[in-house]
Image (tube, grey):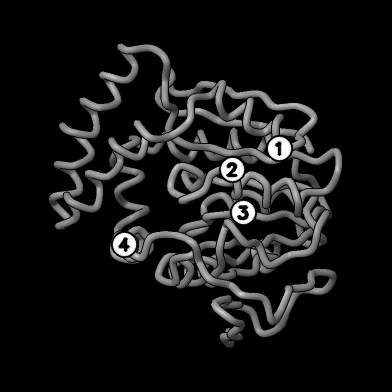
Amino acid sequence: MALLQFPLLLNFRSSPSPGISFTRGRDFKIRCSNERQALFNRIAPVYDNLNDLLSLGQHRVWKRMAVSWSGAKGGDTVLDICCGSGDLAFLLSEKVGVDGQVLGLDFSREQLLIASSRQQERSSACYKNIEWLQGDALNLPFPNDTFDAITMGYGLRNVTDKERAVQEIFRVLKPGCKVSILDFNKSNQPVTGLIQEWMIDNVVVPAATVYGLADEYKYLKSSIQEFLTGKELEQLALAIGFSDAKFYEIAGGLMGNLVATC
């Protein structure tokens, strides 16, 4: 598969998808810390293995729930922001089928290369409808009202400007359509927070240490502490203009999923 290059935008298909236009000539400066971008490039080779190990495979259930909440259906054009190695994008491709189109966007080139490689290993025709793009969640390279559904898994917590990210989602989502945002939950319950911190200190970081990535995973605790609560996420979505917003706690409150309707 040939590599097409745009200004700070990488396209891992041989040509742009029919019906999708990319804004060329814009300033695609990626507004995230260089350190955070480098972090995700470093963890890319072991990201999937660690997810399976640390969640005992449950992350696959949570991701299916997120995709289901997005309302994606056959023939839709959908976007997965902060797509990483492609889990949500692959699930979306199964939903929209061969007549649909999936765009997976991430700022980490290494993650996208892994996602593209995983795509080549899959034989089902529906997986050929995915296009991988390197770009900025704070400056999405798409026109207004482009997508029938949007997902974002474990990405909103990591962007430098969460309000801007949600504004961009609102801009490119078609009226009446939904975004589904899965992430760690910043719980109001002290016990849940303590369990979360204990698991990071005693399970996540030690497991990452085996791969030489302890420092890379220590950021999780502070990123959750600095994140928004479910109620705050609902309020943010409504303030930006979404007509409805509902936050669901899952995995005993350790994870959460915001569903907002444009």
Residue designated by label 4 = 35
Nearer to us in this view, 257 or 49: 257
Give how far across and how far down residue 110 sits, in percent. 40, 70
Q: Secondary structure at mark 1?
A: helix
> Disc 3 vs disc 4: which is toward the camera?
4
Cα distance in 3D space between marks 1 and 2:
8 Å
Q: Secondary structure at mark 4?
A: helix
Neighbours of disc 1 within 10 Å: few (<14), some (14-19), many (20+) = some
**Label 4 near label 3: C-beta < 8 Å?**
no
Residue designated by label 1 = 240
Residue designated by label 2 = 163
The residue depicted at 35 percent of the width and 45 percent of the height is 51
The residue depicted at 47 percent of the width and 57 percent of the height is 84
Cα distance in 3D space between marks 3 and 4:
23 Å
Neighbours of disc 3 within 10 Å: few (<14), some (14-19), many (20+) = many
Give how far across and how far down residue 240 sits, in percent. 71, 37
Labelled disc at residue 91: none
Q: Amino acid at mark 2?
A: Glu
